[in-house]
Each structure stands twice: as structure tokens, then as C-alpha cells.
Image (cartoon, grey):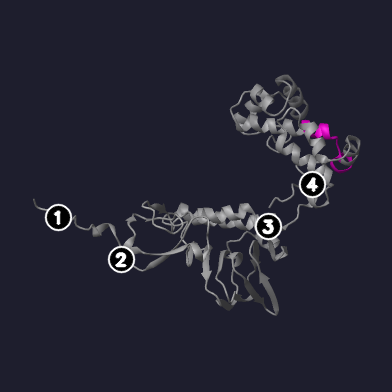
């Protein structure tokens, strides 16, 4: 009986090429969990690479990567105005000396770096975002004994809004890297090379968002910096729990001082009592929901912590001079709401006519 002939190798599903370094899940940047995979042994499915990542051992199943889990030696997304990059330097790597031409933010993910700024020597550390301004003399020297992985975002001065430029020139050299900053970088590198105008616009707007987040973290909130801790705790609790029935009691507890002491401090800083602040906050949030959602007046009233729809209606008339139904009708018919803006929720310092802190 003739033996079955071996099936021919499907060479069309394989690529023979150079090696890639793949980083397995949960151990980004750790050499112990790196695998060097020859593409001659990796099936290709469009833009996805099929490999096994269970501890670096073959387990008989493939996990598909779309590029975000690869350890890139050099990754770049750019337009004519904005550049995002991710670079891995080998031990002893250098960059410069050079003259910075853009506004640039740099964040270290691993390793170390020292940068000479003219005659000033700075050390860059993991977990912080660093700002470099146009015209600066720079010379980067990376760790001599380990790899250094960092990302950056640079924006041409002609594209950077004038207001941003003025604030950036007054901003500190570094701020802690926030979760928002990391999410913005992650969003950029999920994109592919721009093939449409919309993609390029998205990259540029994300670049501006990254610098806005740097300013948000670096420029102290004017009201927050001088705010009494008890008042600040009360305000934060109200913002997070204004729809709860016992929000006021919880906010008093969060303040951590006696009720009378809180009322005294609150009057000094906010010009009103804690209870009145809460009801104004609820009224303005409810007015915003009237304009921005299709919920009924009753639904909005209960979601915002009012005892009943009539209570909301009474406070809305006091605040805006008309009923909730009238507010919605006016906003939906011509986009305008009389009195204070319906979506404007009282923030820190607004009770006394100050601008909202952190606004750009």
C-alpha cells in the first residue's frame, strides 16, 4: 500500500527576512523575556505577526501582534508640523550636540540620560516628562551600561499656538508623567502612517493635546495652590458624588473638620455656604443635562440629587429665570440659554469671578 506523500510546504505564507526582537506580555524591556524570532519561521497575516508569547516557549498556539507590542528600535509618526517618535538607544548612545529647532517633550521609559543644555547639565529620569525649547544647545548622553528607551513629541514653532508658546516658556523643565500623557502617546502609536488628511490632522491635534497636558500638570491651579485642604476635599467630593442623596454629609466627612469650622472656611474662600454651593452645583449640572441629553426633567432631577422635579424646577427658575422646559426649548431652538451658561459648572475660584484654573 503506497505511503501518503508529504504535503508540500506552503512557502507563500512565510517570509524569509531579518530577525525581529519581540517583547512578551508584561515584561516590556526585560531581556530575560525577549525572543529573537526569524521571520522565516513566523507566519504573516497582513500586517500582523503570529508568535507565541507564553514565557518565551513554544506552546502550540499563536498570539497576533499588531505592532504595539513590538520593541521598536525606531518608530515615528509625523506630519509637516508634528513628530512623535520612540527610540531605543544601546548602552553608550549619544545624540548631539545640536540646536533644538522645535518645542519638544521627552519621556524616558527605561534607562538613564544626561543632557547638556549649554553649560548646564541635567539628568533625565524615568517617570517624568521634560521640555526642550527652540534655540537651545543640547547634547544627550545615554546610559553607559544599559539600554535607554524614550518617546518624544516635537511641534514646529510656526504651528504651536502663541498662547501655548508663552506658557511653555514660563513652564518648568519637567513634570511627573501623568496617566493622561501615557494614554495620548499610546493613542498616537496605534495609528498607521498617514494616508489621508484626516489622519494627519488627528496626529497634529494629539500633539497639541500632549503639550496641553504638560501645561496642565506644570502650571499650578491658582485657586488649588492656595486652597484650604478641607475646602478642597469638600469640593472634590461634591464633584464626584453630587448625584447621591447624602452627598452633603459625605462631603462634610471628607473635609475632616467640624461642620462649623468648614462653614467658616468655606465662606472665606467661596463666598457662600457648603449647602448653597452644592445646590448651585446640582442646578447647573442639571441645566447642562437639559441642553445636552434627551432625558426627561424628572430623570435629570433625580440623577442630579434633587428631592423631586418640583425642587429642581424651583431652583432653575431662581437661577435662570425660567422653567427647565423653557431652558430646553430655548436652547434647542436657537442654541442660547439666558442667564449663566447652562453648561458652566462652578469651579474652583469662580464664585468670586476668577477664571477656571488650568484653562488654556
Mark drawn on residue 314: none
Mark 2 and mark 4: span between their CA atoms? 65 Å
Closer to the observer: label 3 or label 4? 3
Closer-to-camera residue (101/84):
84
User: Is residue 165 placed above or below 355 in the rendered structure?
Assistant: below
- Element on which disc 4 rests: loop
Residue 301 in the image, given as x and y percentages of width and height: 69, 25
Looking at marks 2 and 4 on the same chain, the residue that comes earlier in the sequence is marked by 2
Residue 199 lies in the magenta stretch: no
Q: Are marks 3 and 4 in contact (CB under 8 Å)?
A: no
Q: Are marks 2 and 4 in contact (CB under 8 Å)?
A: no
Looking at marks 3 and 2 on the same chain, the residue that comes earlier in the sequence is marked by 2
Mark 1 and mark 4: span between their CA atoms? 84 Å
User: Is residue 72 placed above or below 229 in the rendered structure?
Assistant: below
Closer to the observer: label 2 or label 4? 2
Closer-to-camera residue (339/154):
154
Residue 276 lies in the magenta stretch: yes
Mark 3 and mark 4: span between their CA atoms? 19 Å
Q: Looking at this rendering, what residue extends furthest in the front direction?
A: 1
Residue picked out by circle 4: 354
Q: Looking at this rendering, what residue extends furthest in the left direction?
A: 1
Mark 1 and mark 3: span between their CA atoms? 68 Å
Region rendered in magenta: 266-279
Residue picked out by circle 1: 5
Amino acid at each position: 500500500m503506497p505511503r501518503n506523500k508529504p504535503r508540500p510546504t506552503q512557502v507563500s505564507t512565510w517570509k524569509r527576512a531579518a530577525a525581529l526582537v519581540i517583547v512578551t506580555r508584561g515584561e516590556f524591556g526585560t531581556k530575560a523575556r525577549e525572543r529573537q524570532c526569524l521571520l522565516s519561521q513566523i507566519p504573516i497575516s497582513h500586517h500582523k505577526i503570529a508568535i507565541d508569547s507564553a514565557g518565551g516557549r513554544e506552546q502550540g498556539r499563536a498570539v497576533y501582534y499588531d505592532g504595539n507590542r513590538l520593541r521598536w528600535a525606531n518608530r515615528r509618526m509625523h506630519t509637516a508640523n508634528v513628530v512623535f517618535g520612540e527610540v531605543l538607544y544601546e548602552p553608550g548612545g549619544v545624540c548631539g550636540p545640536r540646536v533644538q529647532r522645535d518645542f519638544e517633550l521627552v519621556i524616558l521609559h527605561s534607562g538613564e540620560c544626561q543632557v547638556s543644555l549649554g553649560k548646564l547639565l541635567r539628568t533625565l529620569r524615568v517617570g517624568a516628562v521634560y521640555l526642550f525649547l527652540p534655540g537651545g544647545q543640547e547634547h544627550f548622553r545615554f546610559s553607559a551600561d544599559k539600554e535607554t528607551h524614550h518617546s518624544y513629541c516635537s511641534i514646529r514653532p510656526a504651528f504651536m499656538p502663541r498662547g501655548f508658546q508663552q506658557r511653555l516658556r514660563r513652564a518648568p523643565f519637567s513634570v511627573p508623567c501623568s496617566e493622561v500623557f501615557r494614554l495620548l502617546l499610546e493613542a498616537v502609536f496605534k495609528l498607521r502612517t498617514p494616508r489621508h488628511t484626516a489622519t494627519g490632522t488627528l496626529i497634529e491635534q494629539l500633539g497639541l493635546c500632549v503639550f496641553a497636558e504638560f501645561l496642565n500638570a506644570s502650571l499650578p491651579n491658582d485657586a488649588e495652590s492656595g486652597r484650604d485642604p478641607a475646602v478642597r476635599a469638600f469640593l472634590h467630593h461634591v464633584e464626584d458624588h453630587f448625584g447621591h442623596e447624602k452627598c452633603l454629609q459625605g462631603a462634610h466627612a471628607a473635609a475632616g473638620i467640624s461642620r462649623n469650622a468648614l462653614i467658616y472656611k468655606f465662606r472665606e474662600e467661596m463666598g457662600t455656604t457648603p449647602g448653597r454651593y452644592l445646590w448651585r452645583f446640582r442646578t447647573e449640572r442639571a441645566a447642562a443635562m437639559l441642553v445636552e441629553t434627551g432625558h426627561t426633567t424628572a430623570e435629570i432631577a433625580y440623577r442630579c440629587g434633587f428631592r423631586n422635579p418640583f425642587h429642581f424646577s424651583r431652583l432653575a427658575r431662581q437661577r435662570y429665570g425660567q422653567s427647565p422646559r423653557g431652558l430646553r426649548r430655548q436652547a434647542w431652538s436657537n442654541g442660547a440659554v439666558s442667564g449663566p451658561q447652562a453648561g458652566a459648572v462652578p469651579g474652583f475660584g469662580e464664585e468670586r469671578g476668577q477664571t477656571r484654573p488650568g484653562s488654556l
